[in-house]
Image: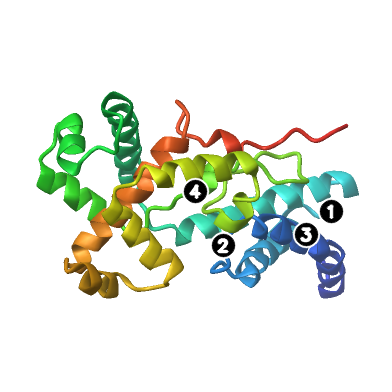
Amino acid sequence: MENLTDQELLQAFALHAPLVEKLARSLGRRLPACVDAEDLIQDGHLALVHAVLATYQKLNAAHFKNYVALRVQGAMLDGLRAMDHGSRQLRKDMRAVELALQKLGHLLGRAPLEQEVATELDISLKKYQRMLQEAADYNLISLEDLGAFDDLPIPTLCAEANPLAMLERAALRQSLAQAISLLPSQSHSVLHHYYVDDLKMHEIGRLLQVSEARVSQIHTQAIALLRSCMVDGSGSIPALKPRRRNR
C-alpha cells in the first residue's frame, strides 16, 4: 500500500474522479434507464481509491491514468454482471434455442411451434417450456452484443443495451421490424401488451385467458424468435457491431 497522507489521497482522488464520471457516462449511454449511473460511479470510485492506494507513486501520470481506466472499467462491469441473474448454462441453453429457431424458420418458412423447437433440441415439450419460464428476463439486446466503448480504445463487454438507443441504427430497425412481422399473433399480442401497454404478466394472462407462467413462456420464445432473426452465426447482432471511427 502506498505511503500517502490523507491530503495526498484526497488530491489524487479529486484529480482522477472526472475520469470515473466520464467512463460512467460512456457506459451509461449503452444501458437501460433502470441502471442507476450513481451505482456505476460508486463502483468506479472504489476502484479509483484502490488504484491510488496500490500504485499512485509507482507509475507516471500517463501510465497511472491508463491503469485507473482499466481498474474502473473492470469494477463497473463487475458491478453490472453482479446484477445480471442469468446463469451461464441458461445463456447457453437460450443460444441453442435461438439456433434451433433460426434453423427451423428457414426450413419451415414460418415461426416454429414450441413442440417443433423441443423436438429439434431433443428435449420434451415440458422441459422446453420450463426452460422458457426460467429465462423470463431474457433480453432482446444484451451487453455482449455491443462490443466496445464509443470513445475508449479498450474493448469491453457490457450487460444490457438500451433498446431505444440501439434502434437508432437503421439496419437494426429493419431487421427487428421484419422479425416482428413473422411472430405468431399470440406472441405479438404478448409483446404489445407488455412493452406498449405496459401491462404486467398476470394482467396479460387475464386478457389472453392463460396463466402468468404461460405468458412468461410466450414472451421468452418471442424474444428468442426476434433474436434468431437478427443474430449471425457467431450469435452476435451484426447491426450492433461498433463502427470504425474516422481517423
Q: Which mark is residue 57?
A: 1
Q: Are marks 4 and 1 in contact (CB under 8 Å)?
A: no
Give the CA distance from mark 2 to mark 4.
11 Å
| Mark 2 or mark 3, earlier in chain | 3
Front position in the image: 176 or 121: 176
Label 4 sits on what residue type? Ser
Depth check, mark 4 against mark 3: the one in front is 4
Q: Earlier in the sequence, mark 2 or mark 4?
A: 2
Q: Secondary structure at mark 1?
A: loop
The N terminus, quarter of image: bottom right
Q: Is residue 29 above or below residue 239?
A: below
Q: Nearer the viewer, mark 1 or mark 2?
A: 2
Closer to the chain start, of discs 4 and 3, is: 3
- For the point 46% across and 34% down, the residue is 231
The answer to whether the residue labelled 4 contacts the one labelled 3, judged by CB atoms less than 8 Å apart, is no
Residue 142: numbered disc: 4
Question: Distance between the Cα atoms at labels 4 and 1?
Answer: 39 Å
Q: Amino acid at mark 2?
A: Pro
Which class describes the residues within 10 Å of circle 2: few (<14), some (14-19), or many (20+)? some
Question: Would residue 51 be seen by someone viewing this image from the given angle?
Answer: yes
Q: Nearer the viewer, mark 1 or mark 3?
A: 3
Name the side, left or right, on which 4 lies relative to 168. Answer: right
Q: Residues within 10 Å of mark 4 (few under 14, many from 20)?
A: some
Residues packed near mark 3 inside 10 Å, few (<14), some (14 to 19) or many (20 plus) = few
The residue under label 3 is which amino acid type?
Answer: Lys
Residue on which the image places disc 2: 32
Q: Which residue is mark 3?
A: 22
Can residue 162 be seen? no
- Which of disc 3 and disc 1 is earlier in sequence? 3
Mark closer to the observer (2, 3)? 2
Mark carried by residue 228: none
- Tell me the kind of residue under disc 1: Gln
